[in-house]
Image: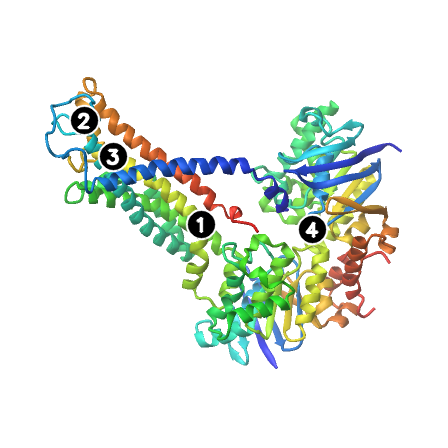
Amino acid sequence: MTTLLDIRELNIEANGKKLVSDLSFTIAAGERLGLIGESGSGKSLTALAAIGLLPEGLQASGSVILDNRQVIGARDRDLVPLRGTAAAVIFQEPLTALDPLMKIGQQVGNAVKRRAKRDGGPTDKASIQREVLALLDQVALPDPYRISAAWPHEISGGQRQRAAIAMALACKPKLLIADEPTTALDVTTQAEILALLGKLVRERDMALLFISHDLPVVAGAVERVVVMQHGRVVETGAVSTVFDQPEHAYTQSLVAAARAFDDALEIAR
Amino acid sequence: MTDTATVIASPEGRKRRSWTFMIGAVIVGLHIVIGLLTLIWTPFDPAAMSGGRLEAASLTHLAGTDRLGRDLFSLIMIGSRIALIVGTGAIIIGGLIGMTIGLLAAFASKTLDDVLAAGLDILIAFPTLLLAMLIVASSDGASLWTAIVAIGIANSAIVARLTRILAKRVLSMDYITASRISGTSWLGVVTIHVLPNIWPTLLVNLALQFGLAVIAEASLSYLGLGTPPPNASWGRLLQEAQGTVYSAPLGAIAPGIALVSLVIGINLLADGLRDIADPTRRSRR
Amino acid sequence: MSLIEVRNVSFSYTRQSRTLHDINLTLRKGCNLGIVGESGSGKTTLLRLLLGLNKPTSGEVRFEGSPLDLGNRQMMRGFRRGVQAVFQDPYSSLDPRQRVFDIIAEPLRSLGIDGDKNEAVTQVLKAVGLSSDATERYPHEFSGGQRQRIAIARAIISRPDIILADEVVSALDLSTRIRIVELLKELSATMTFVLVSHDLSLVSSLCEEMIILERGHIVEAGKTHEILANPGHSYTQKLLGSIPRMPR
């Protein structure tokens, strides 16, 4: 099985302070991995480091190999072809993930066009529009034509997140990185988006890196997990193993907390 | 995640900003000292003919004399005093009027607020100078105080708009709701929460307005709408030096340098003040 | 003893749409209530009405038996002493320019509560699990969970009968969440809590009774364990079914 993302001893620091230390994990093609961590764990930075988008002022060392290309130390120019094709990202806040001054159709269309150019596919307006509508339909957006002509602020949070997923899919990525994609959504919308993500990942045989602090959500989305605390990996393993018999004290406390909330729902059953 | 942002805020930027603050403070301080000094002493009696006409700079007359033989250096020193008075007066008037209107607009109902905001935008669209000229021309006669009031009123619109937007942002915060639920009256909310949160940004803005007020008054005087010597501002001195600018350039250069130095000093000071306005700069344990 | 009663309350922000339809609700001392709803359900509006921040468009809100008159200073003072709140966003619910001491002591000053302020502040800080040296510091020096504790301290200092908590742990991490819930459980021995949230597991952890709001209507109301065992309304069922569960 080909390894899509190979992170070895990744260190990220800023102003002498270590934000991520000695991080290592791999994701194979078609594999679904969960990154569990709370704020300050370095999970989001790890996602950014994987595609070479760390903010200015942060230094990364170690090795991050995405689709057989070393990301650490690479020039931005060399990373551009990787972004989108090798990996695409979905962020937490649907409002800021979309450009407020561009219609949905145009934003998704831009992603489609970029990919078409790389593949040598048709880039005329009609083909792009057809692809855009198809994508919007695949992410279960009702009335894709209307949504395509709408501005981000005119549609709901759940719909915006679906549009962001459509944009990510337009890139036809091998690896989909989802950073807290449903944290800002209502619980019923969250369930729908998670189901959608699961379906799309399976259908397109994409690898998935799912980042969240919400244990039950992660459990439903991936098979294997990596638990991070203060920038370090504290535990890894299959979901069933880690959730059933957590070894590290931190993981144990997280699992206990998640179970306590879960048990509250079992009051009468 | 605020952690990344605060961790990478640069200490170098802050050092540079404290340098600008120091330099600005020194320049402005110098002008203040000179201005205060003129209340009790100037090298020569500024109203008297103490030398020949349009003399060049010398050890006795450091900036030479003007077209009536008055010591230019003394006149420039007085200009510092005038400029500082104008600046202070204008921002006090502009600040008080502007903040009151701005706060009223922030608390007003939507329709009233819309009307006020539109009114402010119209006022701001007027060039400050033009507005000031209109006010001065329609009053009893050109004098220092007319100029101060005119400039103050012209400034107030900008202060009002800024106050309004800052106050509105504060009022939308949960801590305001929490304060009301704690039983605090609206007046209490304004004094305890709104004002302390908006004054730093306002202060920086007022500092910049100070410099603009000085320039505005200089322009008014240049156009003949200010007080004549010996209580003349630099603008008036510039106007008087116009005719002889080729034969005696110092007459224009000297007041020009004084004006430019004060405004630059104020702008540097204001820039340095931005640092104080930044809440994350507050001392950490 | 009923503290707050909501009778046939409807609310509209604009003439075109109605946010709350004919709501009937009773808050009783000693009985924690959960108000469950997603965005657009009207829960925020209901919360504001319960806090006396808005007047209902129709119907009335009663406090200790009498209609709540927002203009009656005496009544409002008593109301504010008895009914307090904690909000969702730990980053906007504390004034960044105030020291923690002043933040927590504000209700004492505004409601004219006599007594040693230092003593009162130290007591509530202890009750929420913060050390007393927090008083001289500023909000930005604390984490999200600690800020919520400060907000809770501010809410309990007037010894209210009811505390309304609006999505009070939604912005917090899991470990912090569980600790705050434990704190609320402790405090609910002496105070009644009304938790407004979309999170059914949170509400179920703390509230004996709950109501489910959908688009401004109460679609289900009753004892928590009964609703969980037998959700009657289809929306409640959908809500319950959407909650991601831990693998067993």
Q: Which element is circle 1 on?
A: helix
Q: Amino acid at mark 3?
A: Ala
Q: Is residue B241 above or below residue C97?
A: above
Foreground mark, 4 or 1, reads: 1
Residue C211 in the image: state x and y as whole percent: 67, 69
A269 vs C3, left or right, is right
Marks 4 and 1: same chain? no
Q: Is residue A252 above or below residue A115?
A: below
Q: Quadrant of the N terminus of chain C?
A: bottom right
Residue A176 in view in this figure: yes
Q: Which residue is mark 4?
A: A183
Q: Which mark is residue B218?
A: 3
The answer for which chain carries disc 2 is B
Q: Which element is circle 4 on?
A: loop
Foreground mark, 2 or 4, reads: 2
Q: Is residue C115 above or below residue A131?
A: below
Residue A136 in view in this figure: no
Q: Which mark is residue B166?
A: 1
Marks 3 and 1: same chain? yes
Q: Which mark is residue B61?
A: 2
